[in-house]
Image (tube, coloured by chain):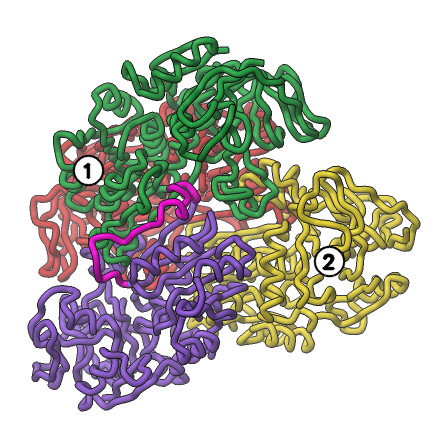
Chain colours: A purple, B yellow, C red, D green
Amino acid sequence: MKAFVMKEIGSVGFADKPVPKPGPNDAVVRTTRALICTSDSHTVAGGIGPRQDLTLGHEAVGVVADVGSQVRDFHPGDRVLVGAITPDWGDRAAQAGHASQSGAPLGGWKFSNSKDGVFAEFFHVNDADANMAKIPDTVADEVAVYCADMLSTGFMGAEHGNIPIGGTVAVLAQGPVGLMCTAGARLRGAGLIIGVESVASRQKLARAYGADEIVDFTKEDVVERVLELTGGEGVDTAIEALGADATFQTAVKITKPGGTVSNTGYFGEGEFVRIPRVEWGVGMADKTIATGLCPGGRLRMERLLRVLAAGRLDPTLMTSHTFAFDEMEQAFEIADKKLDGAVKVLITF
Amino acid sequence: MKAFVMKEIGSVGFADKPVPKPGPNDAVVRTTRALICTSDSHTVAGGIGPRQDLTLGHEAVGVVADVGSQVRDFHPGDRVLVGAITPDWGDRAAQAGHASQSGAPLGGWKFSNSKDGVFAEFFHVNDADANMAKIPDTVADEVAVYCADMLSTGFMGAEHGNIPIGGTVAVLAQGPVGLMCTAGARLRGAGLIIGVESVASRQKLARAYGADEIVDFTKEDVVERVLELTGGEGVDTAIEALGADATFQTAVKITKPGGTVSNTGYFGEGEFVRIPRVEWGVGMADKTIATGLCPGGRLRMERLLRVLAAGRLDPTLMTSHTFAFDEMEQAFEIADKKLDGAVKVLITF
Amino acid sequence: MKAFVMKEIGSVGFADKPVPKPGPNDAVVRTTRALICTSDSHTVAGGIGPRQDLTLGHEAVGVVADVGSQVRDFHPGDRVLVGAITPDWGDRAAQAGHASQSGAPLGGWKFSNSKDGVFAEFFHVNDADANMAKIPDTVADEVAVYCADMLSTGFMGAEHGNIPIGGTVAVLAQGPVGLMCTAGARLRGAGLIIGVESVASRQKLARAYGADEIVDFTKEDVVERVLELTGGEGVDTAIEALGADATFQTAVKITKPGGTVSNTGYFGEGEFVRIPRVEWGVGMADKTIATGLCPGGRLRMERLLRVLAAGRLDPTLMTSHTFAFDEMEQAFEIADKKLDGAVKVLITF
Amino acid sequence: MKAFVMKEIGSVGFADKPVPKPGPNDAVVRTTRALICTSDSHTVAGGIGPRQDLTLGHEAVGVVADVGSQVRDFHPGDRVLVGAITPDWGDRAAQAGHASQSGAPLGGWKFSNSKDGVFAEFFHVNDADANMAKIPDTVADEVAVYCADMLSTGFMGAEHGNIPIGGTVAVLAQGPVGLMCTAGARLRGAGLIIGVESVASRQKLARAYGADEIVDFTKEDVVERVLELTGGEGVDTAIEALGADATFQTAVKITKPGGTVSNTGYFGEGEFVRIPRVEWGVGMADKTIATGLCPGGRLRMERLLRVLAAGRLDPTLMTSHTFAFDEMEQAFEIADKKLDGAVKVLITF
């Protein structure tokens, strides 16, 4: 079968690979839709170290092609969503409530990391009963595919932020994950959502997903402006959705005592991420810093699909480009370099 | 001044009373809008025991008329919202996070219980800095007044229900509190909200506030129908918003193992509220039963006002009748007997 | 092999059965020590319906005899502890944090319920990597075996009770689970632990496990006495460890507003378990009722073994009798009828 | 009256001041016992900026000398404990559950910060009903005084660490707060407590308060040793009890994915506190960082006194020196410079 791979650090292209076979608890899925993620770019750039001919991609939906002997609830022909993160649910980290950390730090992240990803005609799913969800008839593939990572990660940002009904939230950066943090803050009942973003098209999307105010960091001081918008108090919850030391510092500064900094960003550079000491209350202001990796699993996917089936939000506003799998090289370049206003690039199979 | 009082059990009418004076930490508010609550009927019917010439009412907004010497943040002329519950925040129950229970069980409930209520030209507010909130210019009095009890109690029902994003919720009864439970479930991100209600006008309101499905208990078996709507599983959260033993039992039955029964109803009758033993998992199915009394306090009121200022929902859909304070006797009868499709009856001053 | 079975409702005895074979993810354990549980009596009495020649028992330790092809961390010869509850960790209830409810209400309870139990020379363990734990050299089999159910259930009672450091706790009934609730309350830092019990030998054990005060319900009114001991307030946490309607009512009555009733008892009789309406604060006093079934899993077992390895408590004080497996009939009668001051009856293999 | 003051940055001595008068909600307490805190040294060194003739000290017990007109539960002659932190309970931060942050970041800290402290013959207590607790007859003044800050802060370190029963904990530094973190971890049921400390006398105290293992950072690599002690996993909870960037980094490194870094240390230096990026899981390993300031309030103090009344631990093991108030200059020097093995220096009045 055809697969789109990272040949080595810095290089991508097509490769021919055998169709995977399921183990007793596994499934093989024929891909129908996939999305390119910024993490794919990080991976190709060497973010997780060298890899050779590793199939890229972790956001996909498809149709079950084959299942192992122990799989109980899925059958060939089922339309399914698979989480970007496919944990080992029996692992002790999962038993402790941290499934995405099963096996190792970030160990639930297998696609395009410890095994081949989803940018291929078929892909393999470990522990299928636990890691896949059937897609309701009323949800199209190109809608459902957003649950795999974007909704799950973005909503996690809001959930970890411990937002009270009527609370104040700032979301720093309105890329696809940040936009879904914004949507997640709205879903949790925030009373004031401040989106920090400088790109006009993303500002517009932020408003569409629930931002009440937009702060453009190229035009105003974010800390000053957020304090002004919150009567000098700071927000209950600041969500970092970029993965930059400076943004993280801003997040700490704009959070009120007793509030939460919720991180969704991947920090790819530097030895340290730095907490501004004084604004952190010299370590005593009850400002909690929470982090996490995209939650996976059947239950999570079913819940996210329910949100979409109920029409609570339309993730396809983020689909800036659509390409056929054959055009993957062009698609990847656009996503990688964020050309032409790229937000999310959808691949059809 | 003129006050509308419970003369004795079963009897209401106007009385003349002196304008209250604030103690050092208190305020006196000139009433501008108030709402009649089912609790007022319970009180008149003897629900909290005998009272003589007690001013009724606990849902009101107004303008500050006078403040005590220690009050710091409020001044005569300020438009303010006052929670129905006005806790003693230094009390140990409040220090434990249960302010509505300060001083005694349900001790935060002072208006029309341990002191005169708000159906008067002026009313007294204990600990004004902690129990009042300024109303934003963009929120009208007849909108803001819904925060005092309806939004606070209804949203609490959702909050105590521990609803995950995409979770399934049933709200049993769609009176004003139930409707705000429905709205609260929507604000918390529920993916499926089932409103149980038989009255057509309330069914319509339930849909307006976010119910995805309506179950009419006069036409179908609630347990069967909810199980059907949830693939046989039951809901993550069942919110009791009536205060009836039979409804409570239904709530336990439709909640999945690991789910939560969140109670907002006032149980006025009988020696016991009964848990169905087998459906409760013989005491081992991890079904939590949570209860509470309307949260009060400045922070809560500010957050609820923020929800309204942001236009997240319009509580005035519930205003079925409006009367001037002079017409209070007629207004009370309509609210008390739920005549003429009464949902909430608004009083203007 | 020899197994001790429930022949039918009301009848027990030995049977000959084949040694079980492990599936790919499973293990077979040669039993070395087991404990008889009150649940075994409930089962024989028909509590879970009719069964034919079902091997009894769910509390055991042993030595791994055989493992399936997919088992990674265990090998023949390993000394292991197996939780009484062996969940399916990939199930959605487990993904939601309620593993004991996986598959069905109480579905994690497989031993002597949906499959043969541990009163046999060998027993079968599903999902061995997730449901077994190695026993440290410093912990003897007859000590470790208490983790399977007694420590796990009893400590859960304390954990669900949300006990603050210095909080007040009452544990109603000091049978083996109640005693471990008492020990659990001590482990969580309670400042006052009241054990309710009438039997002198159990009162003594209660004191040994951490009870500061003993209330004998045959000599004094429990509600009055607990209120007296708590300055009229009631306790932060009342733990029901009997499974009786009257005891449950007492638990609600002695819990302060904002407190928690934590249930560990199995309710075997009647259509309802009844909440006393007025003392429950008419449904508004913030008294939470929590329930659960013994937590299982490798992580839980490892943590409990760590408590024992560190010498935090000695569960063998509860071992009132010891019998060889051959003497199982006599042992079961003593445990079943609580003859001769029976607390826990240990079986050696 | 005589008071021991910070004359200016770097200088201390006695001053004569008038006996304070209570406002309507306040009390004045005649001091009987006090403890010197490292924070007093920070303050004198300029940690909170310049002050002139500010009375030092925030840990004290005494006898009520006078109360304001609104004080309900306390009377002259009552033996009382006063928390180091005396919040404004009506403030919105307190309503949000963060009383120590009331009014401003760390705003609940008033003694020797925004008003005179307790190193004087008399001291003033704001909101007496909410911030004082009666001392049980069975608890001596020199025992009770440890609740004001040491127990409250140390136990908070454990509480914020979210320690499960049987969990693994490391406490970095075994000064008085660190020792009480150790005791707190024991009170919460930790199964393995690792104390990091190089001073022999403090190592001994750490063992007395519950440490199972001691790691001497001058002799071994803390990260390596903690990983070794936890089977390569890291701890569930790492408590920073020093307030140093390097120690904080170690805390992050030894915490397992899904675990918690709980900070109690005061960070007095540098622009940043630095998180090691890779060991933090590039912002995705679910390692939560929690912070806080000593909880105050009557409820907290009553709970801590209950722990002492029940004999759960003996804080006086930390009393290395005792001086009369007249000898305060000598006492302060010993505490300030940690001379002569000083741990806690007790002052008698």
Q: In front here: D56 or B89?
A: D56
In this view, B45 is above or below B204: above
User: What x and y, as percent, mark residue A283?
Assistant: 38, 42
Amino acid type at circle 1 is Arg
Q: In front here: C168 or A191?
A: A191
Across the whole image, how many numbered discs are drawn on residues?
2
**Left or right relative to A172: residue C80:** left
User: What x and y, as percent, mark residue B336?
Assistant: 80, 62
Q: Chain of mark 1?
A: C
Q: Which residue is mark 1?
A: C33
User: What x and y, as percent, mark residue C190?
Assistant: 43, 31
Q: Residue at position x 35%, y 44% from top?
A: C39
Amino acid type at circle 2 is Arg
User: What x and y, as percent, mark residue B137?
Assistant: 68, 65
In this view, C50 is above or below C38: below
Q: Secondary structure at mark 2?
A: strand
Of discs 1 and 2, which sits in the foreground?
2
Q: Which residue is mark 2?
A: B79
CA neighbours of label 1 inside 10 A, class few (<14), some (14 to 19), many (20+): many
Q: Residue at position x 81%, y 54% from top?
A: B30
* Separation of residues labelled 1 and 2 (CA atoms): 72 Å
Quarter of the image with the N terminus of chain D in it: top right
Q: Given contact means CB atoms under 8 Å apart, are the residues at marks 1 and 2 in contact?
A: no
Mark linked to residue C197: none
Q: In front here: D146 or B93?
A: D146
Do pointers 1 and 2 mark residues of a single chain? no
Write the start and end of the magenta stretch as one range.
A266-285
**Left or right relative to D46: residue D108:** right
The reply to whether residue C202 is visible in this rendering is no
